[in-house]
Image (cartoon, grey):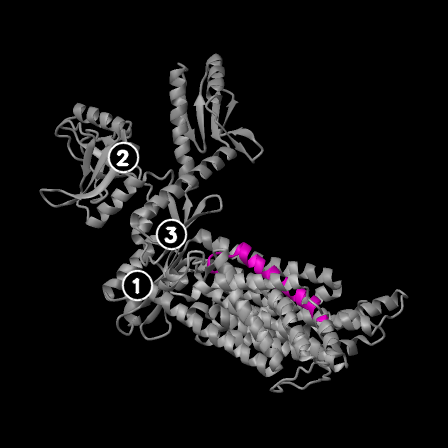
Amino acid sequence: MRTSRWVVVTYTIIILAGIIAALPNILTHQQLAALPDWFPKKQVTLGLDLQGGSHLVLEVDAKSLKADRLRSLLDDVRGTLRKERINAQTARLVDDAIVVNIDDEAQRAKALSTLKALAVPVSGLGLGTGMPDIEVNQLDNQIKVGLTEAGMRDKLDAALQQSLEIVRQRVDQVGVAEPTIQRVGSDRMLVQLPGLQDPTRLRQLLGSTAKMTFHMVANVANGEPLPRGVTMLPDAKTGGQYPIEDRVALDGARLTDARANFDPRTQEPLVSFRFDSVGARQFAEITAANVGKPFAIVLDGKVLSAPVIREPITGGSGQISGNFSVEETATLSALLRAGALPAPLTVIEERTVGPDLGGDVIKMGIYTGIAGFLAVVLFMVALYGMWGMIANFALLLHLILTFGVLTLIGGTLTLPGIAGIILGIGFGVDANILINERIREESKKGLSAFAALDNGFKRAYSTIVDANVTSLIATSLLFMFGSGPVRGFAITMFLGTCLSMFTAVAVVRILMTEVVRRRRLKTIRIEPLVQFFPEKTSISFMKARYLGIGMSILLSLASIGLFFKPGLNYGIDFKGGIQVEITTSQPADLAQLRGTLGGLGIGEVALQQIGGDSNVLIRVQRQDGGEAEQTAAVNTVKEAVQKLDPGVKFDRTEVVGPKVSGELARSGVFAVVLAALAMLVYIWWRFEWNFAIGAIATLVLDTTKMVGVFALFGLDFNLTAIAALLTIIGYSVNDKVVVYDRMRENLRLYKKMPLRELIDMSINQVFARCIYTSAAILLSMLPMAIWGGSAVENFAFPMVVGVIIATTSSIFIAAPILLLLGDWWQHRKVEHGEGAPASVAQ
């Protein structure tokens, strides 16, 4: 039980470093500024659900990008054929390729080699070999030019990289402090904007391609058919139509600056712009050659204005006017300064939290967290007296180190992250309870203080490792398949699980050893201050095995029935749609709201009062047509609500498109199934096949019951619900590992004992631990379940119910299934003449 000095020094350095890293989180900015320069001043970043702000996920429109590339390629093909004097009957776009018809064989062969030269090599799978971006094939008298998959991937990658930089510039134009802009996958980017309540203007900035071009207006009389090369384009303001020449007279890429301004004569808002030297020369030539003719300024396929050229403009600058508001000129000038996006960006997911709601959530998270922590502290003191105080010191250290590590790694703290920290404290308690109960058992055998400590820690260690590995499996899958707040929960849970191994095992071991050494204790007495439970039980649990399994199957069947009717209340994470939380200036009139929103033509609208009389949750069904329609619908809802109540506050807005919701549903189900299989494999490896089958069968029954709980109480089944479900799966397996570990130990000690008696004895030995651990986790989560509010009720309430289900299933379902499998295995061996062993594993 001696610990070397260098180990103690290492532990001390780790703890001091964690405390120093965590300290800035409880200091104000003024206090931090007063600290010396060498002292770390970094604080944990608060998630948008805690500080308020907007979260947008944008996707590059790959179809539009491909169409643009094909149109550009068609121009290149035609230009190349003209340059080489190759007579082609036709060169046109057919589906996803350019088809060139050439009857003359010699000309066709020349065209084939010429067009192949258009191919540009792109990087191929990181192997250093180049792959062409286009492929050219001949079929009879046709030459087909198409895009390769490698070429499109390269184009998409380049477009996303370019879009990231342009979006970063555009966000800077709006002036949002500390934005987060990062790539997500091959075609998406995440934009998080703390403190921004209404992202409408920003969404316009990000969603627009801002592709500005200058065209001549064709001289076409009303009713006349349009000549070739002329297209009717709408007026951006009035919706009228202009016959615009397709040929670009001057590209907007030649712009060097654009500013919001006012007309000095009329004080009308306008945008002034300036060209580079080449653009200025081209602009001067165009205006000199077309005096008296209208000249259209086109942005994203809409005519901003079409002024008549009165005289040549040689200064290289101009103005765009057209009944703009001041805000519109600021947005347009920001777009033009930042440059054109290579392809349109679609907002496929939007979540906005108001700062008031974020502040309330922080307070409630802190209050419920402190309440849960204090409840656990008092419980541990009541259970183990002075030794419980050592466990509480380890829990406090666990909490401080969690914040320290979060600060060091630059983690973001979300509300589910706070739930993860509280749950991590509950799991940390589990390790302390296991250790104390084991030491108490060893002391009862008459061992000396050091021997009891040594044996207690050794016997508890393997159980703690097995239990924590199962938790880490579930947590890792949450991080892999989750997003946003769910990942925040996964990070804090992962840290909590790893740190509990350090604080509950390493630190507590040193402290307990030091207490025994300094007090010169001969024996250790770990006695409760309050006797919650009989010291020794001898309950025949297996007598009720058929009742336990029967009741469990019955409840699971009932839960399956509830799954089909009334069914799960799927949140917008899984079915898509719009969800808006509002606080009205007066008690909300639901009937008036329902009538107004129902007449907007946006499909089914559901209203629900949450919290007080002024708090209303508005749900709108997923819009037909895709992500753009979703964005339009949320703006329509907000405008309609503001007309009814100008003083309304939008606390939270969530918009999830159909594409994202489908992906979230698939990844959520996949995570749950994968977690169950991974745990099955781990238990099979650590124990035996029959233990694994017993655990997985119980897990299926537990999971179906939890699904029934969501259906019965009508809780939102969303990403947070998946997080709760995976955590419950992790805890359920954790609990069964503790019971199985004691059974495995007894199977080695009592090889001749009948299996039924051995299982009963094992459960009685860990019964107190199961009850105490479950009680500690319930105490840590209960304050959040009661007072946490709607933001966490989908997590905290199912966790409370799930802990109860997992604890009872370990005793009344997992153990009986193991007994049934053991009996079947014994009968099978008897039939094969191999004897009748008394146990199922050695």
Q: Along the line of sight, which residue is nearer the eye, 307 or 243?
A: 307
Q: Position of residue 773 (x, y in %)?
A: 61, 75
Q: Position of residue 276 (x, y in %)?
A: 26, 30
* Residue type marked 1: Leu
Left-right relation of 737 to 23: right
Q: Along the line of sight, which residue is nearer the eye, 795 or 27?
A: 27
The answer to whether 55 is drawn above or below residue 161 in the figure is below
Verify whether residue 474 appears in magenta. yes
Give the residue at mark 2. 256
Left-right relation of 273 to 784: left
Give the spatial CA distance, label 2 vs label 3: 26 Å
The quadrant where residue 638 appears: bottom left
Give the spatial CA distance, label 2 vs label 1: 45 Å
Q: Are marks 2 and 1 in contact (CB under 8 Å)?
A: no
Q: Crowding at label 2, few (<14), some or many (≥20) Cα neighbours within 10 Å?
A: some
Give the spatial CA distance, label 1 vs label 3: 33 Å
Image: magenta residue range: 459-486
Q: Main secondary structure of the magenta part?
A: helix
The answer to whether 608 is drawn above or below residue 152 in the figure is below
Q: Earlier in the sequence, mark 1 or mark 3?
A: 3
Give the residue at mark 3. 179
Number of numbered discs overlaid on the protein picture: 3
**Residue for point 29% across, 65% down:** 649
